[in-house]
């Protein structure tokens, strides 16, 4: 039976990789057109060489096909032993890889592929392994469990693939991986696929791989070329409002919002839902059933925004995301590469956004240095800009809506009669206002959320809100305690439990520091630091003399030195 003409053109491009006709036919029906850069380099290498391979490429660049297609071709269909093991970090990714491999082997029906993962009954998986598949895809924990139950025998495997190896290490699977590798034969081909190259990956390569060939697409730890990276500088208290404005100015947004903690994830998702957005949260407190429900809604685009932690989002594979928004920047800089890699997949463009406060500008510069990414500072849109964007989006939807003439025809006479008192111009105004008024009312007299950032003596500092009154505090920590502005703000947030705390100028000295806080939180700060300590050091937090009364920080130093001398003879000292 001749193949469709469209596949003949397709074949000529993928044939160069050395794939057989059965696989070419299967992936042609899946819509594959030309190999991605990582596929062009990896497929021939796996087919023609038994050498171990380290492949570095971002998520969404076709890594599953890069190792999956040659793996299927090399598998011996008449063998009753497990020939290939693919390890991946999460249940979702495990299921996705298994589904893809089954699609690739559509016309090679003798090949059996099974998935093993946690969060579901192990009995069915034991039964499936006893049916003697040639390829097993699994998460480290469940694979190790099946090995220890003597169900999974890896002594005959010829290929071992680590997919998203850096994520597995981030999730704490190193000991499991070591235990699994010890149960595999020395004579096998090991392929390690990763988006970044942390030290732990290097250690695994040195311990378990033989002179691996490194194949990379782009720079190590770098972001995808088709993703734009933007950041917005706002007060901590305005972070959610900035997120809301970005969602409103991008009506077609379909993306993930990353938060640092489970609590932040829940709070942000709840606020979005209350504001009328199709949003939900993904975090570690969800059961597997709840997680599957949320993910199914997100994949089917019934959810516009998914709010997640890094841990909960690991292994997610969702296509067509327009945006990734960092509500909080990750603690580990390399995690940013994984976050931003969720968008701009399969050759499409995407936008990765970071919401930062002024003291986090240093983090942006560190990210640029580590990843080679260039960030562009953008301004949070004004209310007028949002209303304009929403208005034209509404008009565009009306213009392109599919009109069912036959179904609406019988109602038109009554509608014409009802609206005949309106002129054409008035009718358009009324129609547009039905949805548009909510944005006009909400953004009427909307404040400018952007923080001016100026450069002074080579250091970045935030312009202070002149309409706000600040109280200046002393704290008995300084450079010798490895204190920096970011760490100080962490101490403040941790002790006050108030992430909306408005922080002004920060001055870090050698043995002590000064910081400003919105005057209305003065009492909260004093109360929060009563009997508080930091790494075993009792904290002293006191109101300093007003900055206007002290031209130099040295004066403040003398002020506190003199006060300590006066109080030296006292048995007790009030601590805050």
Image (spheres, rainbow, N blue to C red):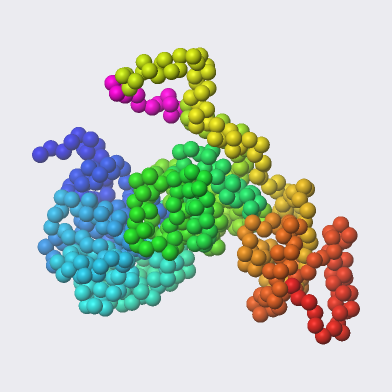
Q: Quadrant of residue 285?
A: bottom left
Can you say which quadrant of the picture contains the C terminus? bottom right
Residue at 70% from the left image edge and 76% from the top image edge: 531
Please tell me which residue lies in front, 194 or 402.
402
Please tell me which residue lies in front, 32 or 539.
539
Does residue 562 show up?
yes
Residue 133 horizontal side relative to residue 253, left or right: left
Most distant residue in the left direction: 1
Give the percent coordinates (x, y) of residue 195. Answer: 43, 58
Give the percent coordinates (x, y) of residue 564. Answer: 85, 77
Residue 392 horizontal side relative to residue 302, left or right: right
Give the percent coordinates (x, y) of residue 342. Answer: 43, 51
Q: Is residue 547 magenta?
A: no
Predominant SS of the magenta segment: helix
Can you say which quadrant of the picture contains the N terminus? top left
Give the percent coordinates (x, y) of residue 524. Answer: 70, 64
Residue at 67% from the left image edge and 58% from the top image edge: 501
The residue stretch that appears in magenta: 396-407
Q: Is residue 406 magenta?
A: yes
Residue 526 horizontal side relative to residue 409, left or right: right
Does residue 159 show up?
no
The vertical placement of 431 against 259, above or below, is above
């Amino acid at each position: 039976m001749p193949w469709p003409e469209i596949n003949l053109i397709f074949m000529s491009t993928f044939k160069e990789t050395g794939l057989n006709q059965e696989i070419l036919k299967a992936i042609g029906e899946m819509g594959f057109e030309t190999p991605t850069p990582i596929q062009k380099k990896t497929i021939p290498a796996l087919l023609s060489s038994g050498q171990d391979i380290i492949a570095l490429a971002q998520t969404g660049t076709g890594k599953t096909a890069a190792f999956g297609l040659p793996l299927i071709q090399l598998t011996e269909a008449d063998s009753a032993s497990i020939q290939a093991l693919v390890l991946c970090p999460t249940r979702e990714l495990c299921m996705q890889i298994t589904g893809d491999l089954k699609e690739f082997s559509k016309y090679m029906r003798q090949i059996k592929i099974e998935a093993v993962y946690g969060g579901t009954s192990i009995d069915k998986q034991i039964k499936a392994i006893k049916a003697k598949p040639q390829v097993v895809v699994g998460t480290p924990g469940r694979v190790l469990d099946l090995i220890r139950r003597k169900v999974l025998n890896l002594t005959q495997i010829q290929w071992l693939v680590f997919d998203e190896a850096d994520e597995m290490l981030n999730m704490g699977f190193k000991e499991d991986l070591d235990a699994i590798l010890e149960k595999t034969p020395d004579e096998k081909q090991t392929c390690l696929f990763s988006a970044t190259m942390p030290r732990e990956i290097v250690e695994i390569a040195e311990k378990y791989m033989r002179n691996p060939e490194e194949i990379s697409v782009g720079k190590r730890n770098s972001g995808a070329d088709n993703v734009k990276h933007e950041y917005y500088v706002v007060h901590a208290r305005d972070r959610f409002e900035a997120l809301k404005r970005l969602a409103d100015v991008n009506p077609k947004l379909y993306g993930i919002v990353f938060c640092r903690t489970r609590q932040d994830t829940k709070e942000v998702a709840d606020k979005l839902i209350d504001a009328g957005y199709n949003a939900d949260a993904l975090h570690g407190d969800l059961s597997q059933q709840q997680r599957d429900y949320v993910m199914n809604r997100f994949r089917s685009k019934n959810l516009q925004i998914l709010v997640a932690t890094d841990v909960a989002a690991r292994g997610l594979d969702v296509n067509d995301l327009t945006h990734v928004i960092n509500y909080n920047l990750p603690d580990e800089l390399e995690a940013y590469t994984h976050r931003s890699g969720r968008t701009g997949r399969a050759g499409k463009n995407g936008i990765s956004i970071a919401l930062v406060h002024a003291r986090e500008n240093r983090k942006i510069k560190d990210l640029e240095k580590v990843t080679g990414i260039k960030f562009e500072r953008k301004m949070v849109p004004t209310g007028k800009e949002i209303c304009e964007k929403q208005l034209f989006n509404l008009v565009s939807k009306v213009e392109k809506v599919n009109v069912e003439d036959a179904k609406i025809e019988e109602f038109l006479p009554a509608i014409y009669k009802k609206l005949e008192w309106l002129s054409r111009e008035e009718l358009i105004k009324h129609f547009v206002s039905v949805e548009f008024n909510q944005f006009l009312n909400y953004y009427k007299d909307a404040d400018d959320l952007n923080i001016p950032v100026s450069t002074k003596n080579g250091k970045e500092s935030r312009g202070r809100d002149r309409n706000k009154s600040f109280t200046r505090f002393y704290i008995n920590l300084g450079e010798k305690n490895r204190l920096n502005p970011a760490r100080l703000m962490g101490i403040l947030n941790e002790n006050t439990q108030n992430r909306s705390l408005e922080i002004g100028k920060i001055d870090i000295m050698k043995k002590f520091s000064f910081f400003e806080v919105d005057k209305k939180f003065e009492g909260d700060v004093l109360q929060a630091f009563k009997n508080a300590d930091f790494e075993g050091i009792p904290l002293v937090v006191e109101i300093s003399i007003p900055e206007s009364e002290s031209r130099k920080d040295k004066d403040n130093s003398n002020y506190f030195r003199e006060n300590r001398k006066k109080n030296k003879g006292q048995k007790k000292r009030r601590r805050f």
